[in-house]
Image (cartoon, helix red, strand yellow):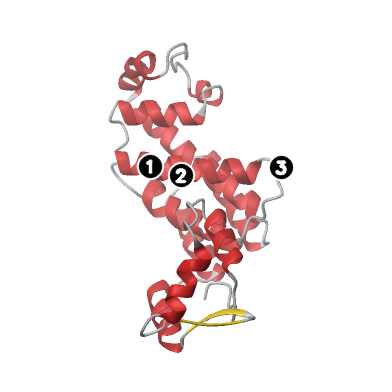
């Protein structure tokens, strides 16, 4: 439904799970066949692959209500009036440019930079003492943060873990950041994995409301 595909095969379901960094179904082919032979059947299958039944397609389309790339760009543009930090405004402008021009790897990287920088500011301005107190417990050998530039030397995963351990960010926020950092790493490093538009959309539509606009973190 997302890709406007009429038919699909089981291997493409596995690829879709991979693109979204989710565990593959235990046996996609068997599960799809079950959906095609059940009553009522939710899939229609033949030698060319599977199709959603008319009823299933209507239900899926209703459930998704996916924002269009244009809508996502508009929502991101609204942030321009809310973000005052000069560096974050630069990250936002580059995120929008990359997304609008189909540079989805770059859009994911820049969206992560924007969200992570927001978290670092939150730690530095409001909870630096708690962060540094938790650091030797959570990550032995790591140097305390004394200036904001020190965040550039710290591992992002460590910063997230320490902030979570010190209750500077809640578990839900930490889980969102950990998942998106994993996607950022995949997008940023050379690999044969294609970055799909839906992956970039998911990253943007998750980071904006759940990190940039969420208070408290």
Disc 2 element: helix
Residue at 59%, 56% (x, y): give it: 96
The x, y position of residue 143, in whole percent, is: 47, 13
Figure check: 23 above or below 152: below
* Picture coordinates of residue 136, whole percent (x, y): 38, 13
Q: Residues within 10 Å of mark 1 (few under 14, many from 20)?
A: some
Image coordinates of residue 72 in percent, x first then y, are: 51, 64
Q: For the residues labelled 1 and 2, say whether their Cβ atoms are less than 8 Å apart.
A: yes
Q: Which sits earlier in the primary sequence, circle 1 or circle 3?
A: 1
81 sits left or right of 91 in the view: left
Mark drawn on residue 81: none
Tell me, for residue 190, which label it has, or none.
3
Q: Residues within 10 Å of mark 2 (few under 14, many from 20)?
A: few
* SS under mark 1: helix
In this image, 3 relative to 134: left or right? right
Q: Is residue 169 visible?
A: yes
Cα separation, mark 1 vs mark 2, equals: 6 Å
Q: Say if 167 sits above or below 182 in the image.
A: above
Judge whether residue 90 can be spotted in this image: no
* Residue matched to label 2: 179
Q: Image quarter for residue 173?
A: top left
Q: Residue at x 41, y 47 (%)?
A: 212
Circle 3 packing at 10 Å, graded few (<14), some (14-19), many (20+), is few
Residue found at x 42% / y 18%: 139
For image coordinates 46% across by 60% down, the residue present is 78
Q: Quadrant of residue 175?
A: top left
Q: Give the spatial CA distance, label 2 vs label 3.
A: 19 Å
Look at mark 1 in the image and give the residue it sits on. Answer: 175
Looking at the image, residue 106 lies above or below residue 126: below
Q: Using the image as rendered, state which of residue 131 and residue 196 is in the foreground.
A: 196
Disc 3 is placed on an element classified as: loop
Q: CA distance from mark 1 to mark 3?
A: 25 Å
């Amino acid at each position: 439904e997302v890709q406007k595909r009429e038919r699909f095969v089981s291997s493409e379901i596995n690829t879709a799970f991979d693109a979204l960094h989710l565990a593959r179904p235990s046996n996609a082919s068997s599960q799809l066949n079950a959906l095609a032979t059940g009553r009522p059947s939710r899939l229609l299958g033949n030698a060319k692959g599977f199709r959603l039944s008319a009823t299933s397609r209507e239900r899926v389309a209703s459930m998704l209500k996916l924002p269009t790339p244009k809508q996502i760009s508009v929502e991101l543009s609204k942030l321009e009036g809310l973000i005052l930090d000069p560096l974050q405004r630069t990250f936002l402008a580059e995120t929008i440019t990359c997304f609008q021009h189909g540079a989805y790897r770059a859009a994911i990287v820049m969206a992560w930079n924007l969200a992570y920088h927001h978290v670092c500011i939150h730690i530095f301005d409001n909870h630096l003492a708690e962060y540094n107190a938790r650091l030797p417990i959570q990550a032995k050998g790591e140097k305390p943060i004394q200036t904001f530039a020190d965040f550039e030397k710290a591992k992002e995963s460590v910063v997230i873990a320490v902030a979570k351990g010190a209750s500077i960010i809640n578990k839900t926020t930490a889980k969102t950041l950990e998942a998106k950092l994993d996607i950022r790493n995949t997008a940023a490093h050379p690999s044969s994995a294609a970055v799909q538009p839906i992956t970039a959309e998911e990253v943007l539509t998750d980071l904006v409301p759940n990190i940039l606009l969420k208070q408290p973190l």
